[in-house]
Amino acid sequence: MCPGRIPAVWPLTREPVKALRLFKPESWQDQAAWQHLRAFLRTTDSQVLVGTPVSCDDTYDVKTWQQTAKLLAFLGRDRVMGLSVGNEIELNPTKECPDRLLHHFEEHWRRCALDLSVLGGGEFANLPMTSVMTTSILYSEDKSWSPQSMRIMDGSVPWPPETPWKLDFQSVFRRLVQTISAERFIFTFNIYPYFLPCPPAVSISCDQWMRDSLCFDDPARCITPKTAAGARYALQSFAQQLAGDAVSPLRMWIGEVGWSSPKANSLSDGQCRDWGTKECSGWSNLENLAHYYKDFMNWDLNLGTGLEPPEYAFYFTIRDSFNFHHPEHFGLCGS
């Protein structure tokens, strides 16, 4: 990691960086790294979303959370925009603890919320909390996959597909929203058209699919804002279940978007085979990364008429990184 080399402006622009995302503090293990981060946040008047992991190893999760809490106290409440409890935990169940994953997640969330209430003498008692997840926790109620049909997974369908496990995120969220105030609870989704490198039907050409995957200016057509609109509709439905039609929109952030060039080792054509289509040629070209990033920078977060836009959208990432030992090339500033 390079905590002393965080860019103060977005690459190739003059736009100042105002929000960072740190997945887990153990990535930066020495005090000097923490000092670099705090100095950057103070100098640029920016904030950071700090994450603490959720695995199936309670000892590890507690130890890492203790380290995270120390970092929060070191940075100060004014420099922290929120705490993320877990990142993409729904992608874990096949390898670790499918039967107790959500129970463990809920327990760890409650532990973090309780500790925040007293951290720094109560300084962090109002800190927003979230858990960053992919939009795979959503499903289409009528199988049309239109944004309006999307709902939060309720345990009625297997996840991952073709497994016996059914993860009921609706019930978990219904309990967790009661642990903190509505103003503090954030739903955060990662959205990656990049990881669908082929059209979902043979009737759709690769040229059309690539255009729709790279653009942001039309929420009815462009995959990133269209997927985000589906998440917003899912939250609308969930909010109505909680409190009826009079409920205010639930808060929503986008935790990651991005494009890899060259090809990320984690990119798979498995979904393409299921659809009977092939990976589009040139999908991971540098030109596509540049196109996606430029359109992201011009996006006003609009999701379509009548839909509340997300409050924040994070771009992944500053530098190339590894995902479970698989090299990925999403970095805007190289390695």
Image (cartoon, rainbow, N blue to C red):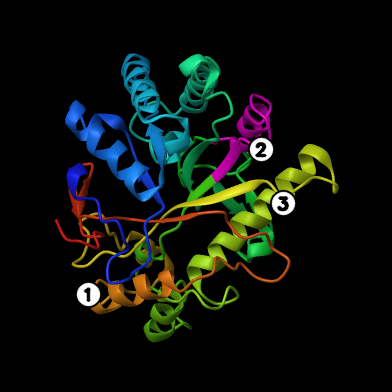
Task: State the image coordinates of residue 258 (x, y, percent, origin top left).
Answer: 35, 62
Q: Is residue 143 left or right of residue 265?
A: right
- What SS does tag 3 mark? helix
Q: Answer with the quarter of the image where residue 23 lies.
A: top left
Mark toward the start of the polypeptide (1 vs 3): 3
As drawn, the residue found furthest toward the left would be 335
Residue, x 45% and y 76% (percent of image)?
A: 215
Between discs 1 and 2, the one toward the N terminus: 2
Amino acid type shown at disc 1: Leu
Horizontal and vertical percent position of residue 153: 60, 43
Alpha-carbon span between mark 1 and mark 3: 37 Å
Tell me if 334 is positioned left or right of 177 in this view. left
What residue sits right under mark 3 in the picture?
236
Note whether 6 is above or below 76 in the view shown. Answer: below
Q: Is residue 258 above or below residue 152?
A: below
Above or below for 146 versus 138? below
Residue at numbered disc 2: 183
Where does label 1 land, which residue?
Answer: 286
Task: Identify the secondary structure beneath mark 2.
Answer: loop
